[in-house]
Image (cartoon, rainbow, N blue to C red):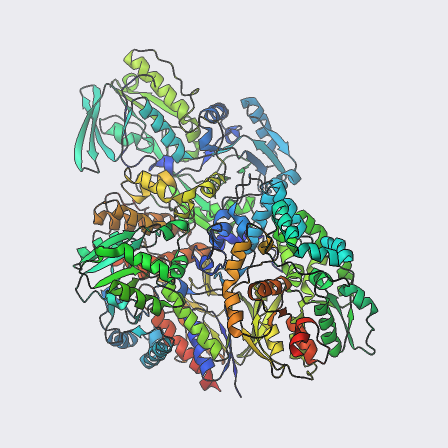
């Protein structure tokens, strides 16, 4: 695992402007001068012990496109994220905005409060006065796509889900906040696919991965969340059970973002990182080892697929595309767009909503041009943003796989397949 | 300030000489606490004064003296005693505290002491001084090289200069001539038959691409080569060496010196020798000696005031030489005191009390100040030098005074960052052309600046910095084809190359 | 049965190798740490600009000559025939993509650089050739206020000093003032907007005078470059041409897009952000390369491998204090020319010999050690090959194309 502090990588920067050219945020707004300026360049003017002078670095969306195109290996996005954390701890973010950030960055905490009163909460979140209030008081843009809470979460369904008999292998599922509170159907699909491949799925106790807190520079709180997860998960790994997740951001956080941003490379952190897998990465390995069960039915659809920017940050290629390629009848048209714009909690913020929509515009155009009944994307907030920008419902690739393995479809996929 | 009509003559741009090739250190005096207690006292006294009169030129980094496994542990107690004796504030830190502040330091360091070292911007300090002098009616002639002093019988009456810009001779007459020519003092005195044995002691310094430390780090041992790392602006500078050279205008940067810097740096900061080295430079310090000594480090660093009337029977000339940057003000004070005496007037020095221009607010410079200003400035989109955050308006304002892009660099720090002029050189050449300067000037200015940057890059060019230079080559050769532009390949404002290295 | 090719390095050489391999039916995966020099260079195909300090007028002939005098030069290894094929194929690809390249090996163009020097190149996009300096007719150069990477006055004065009549104008436009950060990417997007183009044309107005051609910095659109230029020409009623500027290079990025699209259309994949950190070898065969991924290494197995990681600029070769250049992926032996490595002057006419370091290859581009080809299924393309300084001699794209083309085809012939 990389143990070099991100700031040390700024020495590799040769000022070539490739990152600036690729950055989807710098392309649409002056509020963000660009990755080169914010990361390796401003980095030479910062120090942990120095007074905070930053302002524009807060407009980095954390999409990590810059890292992907940098020819010399500067960890630009991580330098920016840590500079933002210094801004926060240095008191450079207003109390109001910090309150707002902390609220949107705690989907689990809010979820626990909202879920028991889901219908009321959803009503409020969809009502104009509710949204106006949210914007005026907290800076939550009234237009941003807030998904509806589900009364019954994934964990509660899983508790009643019968264990498959004679499963050859075991795997632990990291559900993530979105599956628990908003889209339990994704978790159900994941379980179906894993069980179709002979796995018994375990659902460890777990909490929010903490990425929204990391993205908002709230490192102390994020570390608390991460440590808590490590304590809950490391036992499974020591028992030889691996962790798989359908939320690309959660798995990336466990693999890399939390250790790297927090400088947390203790034994548990490294073990969990090395044994956490993206869902399709896990299936691809099965396929390579010859263990992948064949699918049983076709999906006769032509759909746009967007690989989230955070997925690319895993640097594992396109396993989702490869796996979807095994489904007969399914035609996947891949997006070349850099980022949908929402970037986790970024696009929900009043001062960033318009930027997010401008960043996502090429993707929205692409989805429209493909014209399919659904869009496919591994990240939940991206799905909501795509639907927000195009009106096209969006699903996780695992839902297609689940159907191909014979499971009952749910939600938008069910509606399309009739 | 004391009412004299003063004219300063400088053969190149201000700070082109030793003053601009500085380590960036405002001494607390700790370095001399054991070896040279008198110098230590001078340093701490001037340290306090400069903090009062030029805080804007200083960054209050503080300093550490650390005992590494390579240092005699017994020295530390002598150091403490010497500091106390000299009145230098000193306190010991635990190694845990030291590492909390400076995590990259060698964890095998056994003792650490904090002293009031600071980082000093010599360019800024010089400009502040000359601005104040001008305010009081003084004039400064840059690019005027003194070819010889003028002596009539037993009195020096002036100087014969060459104006490098206009390419013509200029004669200056004066009641009194003060030579503050550093390592060149001997040459000047020699031009009127006086012997002033000033030895040129070359010192090499290497800048690391970024601030690996935010505190001045000194080895707690008898002073020698490569035992200080100074954080100054966006870099950290390790230095220095001390080699006697025959000609203050012609000396090499030896690979062995670079190697020594890297090895010594490695002792303070493990991994140092693998870090990106940005640049190396060398300057010559003036070491005055009445008799010859082999190792220049043993020659006293205290300064020397030579009243040639008393010493040689030749009036109208005073030489001030030796010394270190930290004590510049005191050197100037004693010199002007002697000027007053010779001219028969009594006027008090006030330089210790009056803040220099730019320092009226009384606050120190901070590392992030430039970034803060740029973030707040509506012009921040037009960064000419992105590495060092220099805006187009700043360059435009300074253009008329500059005879080369290197002059601009000394004013503004353009070209001093990681890309070493990769982007700003073209931009500034373009601005020169747009400002109506003759075309050949833009072309040769561009070439001269890239050569000037190359001179300090070459001794440390490997790894990331070599990759950077190759990109700069791609831009200036292959994209722009600068090497096939009309006009001369260098001008009289171009760089003076270092001598070719002889060892290794 | 289609064999699999893994390319390492996404610069021009790697992209061309991957493209060729994909179009002949190989399963291609190209991994690259980041983008390559296409993003920085002029967006032209430089084949040979200078030889021994002398301007090359006819690159084809000069290469023939060069090959005989310098048998270690990549052109000698790849052979002129491969260069010819590669240029033809690449030219055809660009033409089909609606972005034609003009020129031939018979004659170098002399096009204006952003500083007003005369820049030799072999193939140039149609968007640049109206700047042909052998034409002799006057031109107007247009700069954009706030954009610092093109100074038309400097370029015009230098051109005029070399006998080419050129005038310059700086345009101050509201759209340019609204954006504080004007870089080539932002400008390229602006030029793709009809309203912005209209503002530009209106502002130029009568300054266009009687010149037949108007030069702009090379920012005239990224995705719709041909359309943008056509519309400008129609509105100005003059020929329009672009001049390459400081990085980023929009013309270079256009070429990168064309190649990546071609690779993907042929079923290949290009992965950014994948830095090779190791290789698995068995005897004389490379089995796989390993790339750095989040919390693990990603294994890329293949039947054939192409190393196109570049030289010192590309990062394929690293140097250190008192350490000669080292090849980072396979640890292949690197030949370093004798001499000081770095000349005393930046603009030394002989260049800096350290940049001629590289891997020694045979005529099949297989890397050689003392005993012969080290691997049976590995070839090297681009600036990773030693024996020349492509920047000093202005052959960056030519070397990449000739060797990339051969490398991509080589793996076919291996089967």
Q: Is residue C131 left or right of residue B284?
A: left
Badge count: 0
Q: Residue furthest bottom?
A: C1
- Front residue (pair B284, B168): B168
Q: Residue C385: where, in percent of width, then height?
A: 40, 71
Above or below for A365 versus B305: below
Name the residue located 26 percent from the left edge and 56 percent from the top edge: C204
Q: Is residue A97 above or below residue B113?
A: below
Q: Position of residue A197 (x, y in %)?
A: 73, 78
The residue nearer to you, when weighing A209 against B109, is: A209
Q: Give the answer, above or below, for where A361 lies relative to B262.
A: below
Can residue A231 be seen here? no
B173 on left or right of A376:
left
Q: Position of residue B70 (x, y in %)?
A: 57, 42
Residue B67, percent across and down? Answer: 59, 38
Name the residue located 33 percent from the left edge and 46 percent from the top edge.
Answer: B498
Q: Is residue A348 visible?
A: yes
């Amino acid at each position: 695992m990389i143990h070099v502090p991100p700031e040390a990588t700024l020495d590799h920067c040769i000022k070539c402007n490739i990152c600036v050219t690729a950055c989807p945020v710098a392309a649409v707004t002056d509020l963000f001068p660009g990755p080169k300026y914010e990361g390796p360049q401003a980095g030479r003017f910062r120090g942990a012990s120095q007074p905070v002078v930053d302002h524009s670095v807060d407009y980095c969306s954390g999409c990590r496109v810059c890292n992907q195109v940098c020819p010399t290996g500067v960890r630009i996005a991580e330098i920016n994220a840590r500079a933002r954390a210094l801004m926060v701890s240095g008191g450079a973010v207003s109390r109001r905005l910090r309150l707002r950030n902390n609220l949107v960055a705690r989907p689990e905490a809010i979820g626990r409060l909202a879920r028991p009163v889901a219908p009321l909460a959803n009503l409020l979140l969809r009502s104009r006065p509710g949204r106006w209030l949210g914007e005026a008081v907290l800076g939550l843009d009234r237009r941003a796509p807030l998904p509806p809470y589900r009364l019954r979460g994934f964990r509660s369904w899983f508790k009643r889900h019968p264990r498959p008999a004679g499963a050859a292998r075991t795997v632990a599922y990291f559900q993530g906040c979105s599956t628990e509170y908003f889209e339990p159907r994704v978790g159900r699909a994941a379980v179906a696919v894993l069980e179709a491949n002979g796995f018994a799925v375990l659902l460890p106790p777990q909490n929010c991965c903490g990425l929204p807190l990391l993205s908002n520079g709230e490192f102390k709180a994020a570390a608390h969340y991460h440590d808590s997860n490590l304590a809950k998960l490391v036992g499974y790994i020591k028992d030889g059970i691996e962790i798989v997740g359908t939320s690309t951001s959660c798995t990336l956080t466990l693999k890399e973002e939390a250790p790297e941003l927090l400088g947390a490379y203790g034994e548990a952190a490294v073990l969990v990182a090395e044994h956490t897998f993206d869902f399709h990465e896990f299936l691809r390995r099965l396929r390579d080892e010859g263990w992948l069960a064949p699918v049983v039915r076709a999906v006769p659809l032509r759909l746009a697929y967007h690989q989230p920017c955070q997925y690319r940050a895993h640097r594992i290629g396109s396993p989702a595309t490869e796996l979807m390629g095994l489904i007969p009848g399914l035609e996947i048209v891949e997006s070349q767009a850099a980022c949908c714009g929402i970037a986790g909690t970024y696009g929900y913020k009043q001062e960033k909503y318009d930027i997010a929509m401008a960043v996502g515009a090429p993707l929205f155009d692409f989805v429209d041009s493909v014209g399919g009944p659904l869009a496919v994307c591994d990240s939940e907030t991206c799905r909501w943003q795509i639907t927000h920008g195009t009106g096209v419902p969006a699903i996780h690739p695992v839902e297609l796989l689940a159907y191909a393995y014979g499971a009952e479809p749910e939600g938008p996929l069910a509606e399309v397949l009739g | 300030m004391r009412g004299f009509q003063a004219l300063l003559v400088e053969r190149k741009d201000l700070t082109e000489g030793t003053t601009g090739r500085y380590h960036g250190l405002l001494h607390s005096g700790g370095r001399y606490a054991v070896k040279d207690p008198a110098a230590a006292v001078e340093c701490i006294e001037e340290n306090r004064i400069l903090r009062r009169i030029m805080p804007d030129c200083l960054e209050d980094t503080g300093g550490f003296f650390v005992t590494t496994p390579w240092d005699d542990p017994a020295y530390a107690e002598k150091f403490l005693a010497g500091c106390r004796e000299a009145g230098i504030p000193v306190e010991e830190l635990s190694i845990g505290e030291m590492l909390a502040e400076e995590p990259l330091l060698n964890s095998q360091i056994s003792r650490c002491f904090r002293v009031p070292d600071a980082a000093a911007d010599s360019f800024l300090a010089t400009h502040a001084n000359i601005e104040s002098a001008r305010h009081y009616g003084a004039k400064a002639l840059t690019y005027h090289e003194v070819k010889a002093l003028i002596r009539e019988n037993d009195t020096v009456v002036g100087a014969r200069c060459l104006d490098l810009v206009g390419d013509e001779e200029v004669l200056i007459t004066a009641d009194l001539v003060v030579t503050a020519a550093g390592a060149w003092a001997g040459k000047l005195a020699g031009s009127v038959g006086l012997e002033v044995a000033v030895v040129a002691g070359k010192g090499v310094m290497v800048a690391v691409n970024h601030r690996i430390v935010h505190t001045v780090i000194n080895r707690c041992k008898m002073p020698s080569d490569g035992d200080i790392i100074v954080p100054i602006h966006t870099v950290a500078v390790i230095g220095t060496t001390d080699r006697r050279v025959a000609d203050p205008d012609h000396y090499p940067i030896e690979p062995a010196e670079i190697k020594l810097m890297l090895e010594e740096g490695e002792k303070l900061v493990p991994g140092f020798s693998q870090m990106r080295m940005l640049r190396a430079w060398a300057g010559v310090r003036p070491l005055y000696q009445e008799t010859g000594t082999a190792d220049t480090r043993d020659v006293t660093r205290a300064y020397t005031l030579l009243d040639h009337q008393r010493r040689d029977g030749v009036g109208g000339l005073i030489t001030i030489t030796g010394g270190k940057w930290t004590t510049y003000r005191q050197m100037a004070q004693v010199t002007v005191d002697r000027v007053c005496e010779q001219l028969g007037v009594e006027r008090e020095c006030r330089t210790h009390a009056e803040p220099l221009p730019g320092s009226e607010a009384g606050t120190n410079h901070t590392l992030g100040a430039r970034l803060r200003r740029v973030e707040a400035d509506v012009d921040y989109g037009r960064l000419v030098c992105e590495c060092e955050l220099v805006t187009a308006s700043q360059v435009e304002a300074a253009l008329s005074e500059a005879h080369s892009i290197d002059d601009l660099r000394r004013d503004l720090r353009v070209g001093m960052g990681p890309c070493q002029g990769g982007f700003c050189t073209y931009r500034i050449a373009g601005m020169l052309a747009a400002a109506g300067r003759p075309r050949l000037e833009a072309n040769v200015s561009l070439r001269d600046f890239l050569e000037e940057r190359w001179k300090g890059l070459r001794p440390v060019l490997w790894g990331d910095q070599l990759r950077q230079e190759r990109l700069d080559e791609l831009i200036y050769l292959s994209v722009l084809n600068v090497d096939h532009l009309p006009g001369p390949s260098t001008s009289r404002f171009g760089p003076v190359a270092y001598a070719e290295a002889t060892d290794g | 049965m289609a064999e699999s090719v893994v390319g390492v390095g996404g610069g021009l050489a790697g992209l061309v190798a991957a493209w060729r391999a994909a179009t002949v039916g190989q399963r291609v995966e190209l991994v690259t740490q980041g983008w390559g020099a296409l993003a920085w260079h002029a967006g032209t195909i430089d084949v040979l600009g200078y030889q021994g300090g002398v301007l090359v007028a006819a690159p084809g002939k000069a290469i023939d000559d060069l090959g005989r005098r310098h048998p270690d030069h990549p052109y000698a290894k790849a052979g002129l025939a491969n260069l010819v094929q590669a240029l033809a194929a690449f030219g055809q690809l660009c033409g089909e993509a609606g972005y034609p390249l003009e020129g031939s090996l018979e004659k170098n163009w002399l096009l204006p650089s952003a500083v007003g020097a005369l820049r030799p190149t072999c193939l140039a996009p149609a968007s640049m050739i109206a700047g042909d300096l052998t034409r002799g007719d006057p031109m107007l150069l247009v700069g954009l206020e706030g954009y610092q990477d093109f100074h038309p006055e400097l370029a015009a004065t230098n051109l005029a000093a070399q006998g080419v009549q050129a005038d310059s104008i700086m345009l101050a436009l509201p759209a340019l003032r609204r954006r504080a950060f004007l870089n080539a990417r932002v400008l390229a997007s602006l030029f793709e907007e009809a309203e912005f183009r209209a503002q530009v044309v209106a502002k130029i107005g009568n300054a266009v005078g009687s010149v037949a051609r108007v030069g702009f910095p090379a920012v005239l659109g990224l995705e719709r470059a041909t359309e943008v230029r056509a519309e400008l020409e129609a509105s100005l009623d003059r020929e329009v041409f672009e001049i390459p500027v400081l990085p980023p290079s929009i013309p270079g990025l256009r070429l990168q897009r064309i190649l990546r699209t071609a690779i993907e259309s042929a079923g290949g994949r290009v992965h950014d952000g994948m830095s090779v950190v190791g290789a698995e070898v068995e005897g004389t065969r490379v089995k796989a390369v390993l790339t750095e991924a989040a919390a693990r290494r990603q294994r890329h197995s293949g039947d054939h491998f192409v190393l196109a990681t570049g030289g010192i600029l590309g990062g394929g070769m690293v140097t250190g204090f008192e350490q000669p250049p080292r090849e980072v992926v396979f640890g292949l032996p690197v030949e370093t020319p004798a001499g000081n490595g770095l000349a005393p002057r930046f603009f030394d006419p002989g260049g800096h010999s350290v940049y001629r370091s590289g891997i020694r290859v045979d005529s099949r581009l297989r890397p050689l050690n003392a005993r012969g080809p080290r691997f049976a299924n590995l070839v090297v393309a681009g600036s990773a090959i030693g024996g020349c300084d492509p920047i000093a001699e202005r052959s960056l794209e030519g070397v990449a194309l000739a060797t990339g083309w051969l490398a991509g085809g080589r793996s076919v012939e291996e089967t």
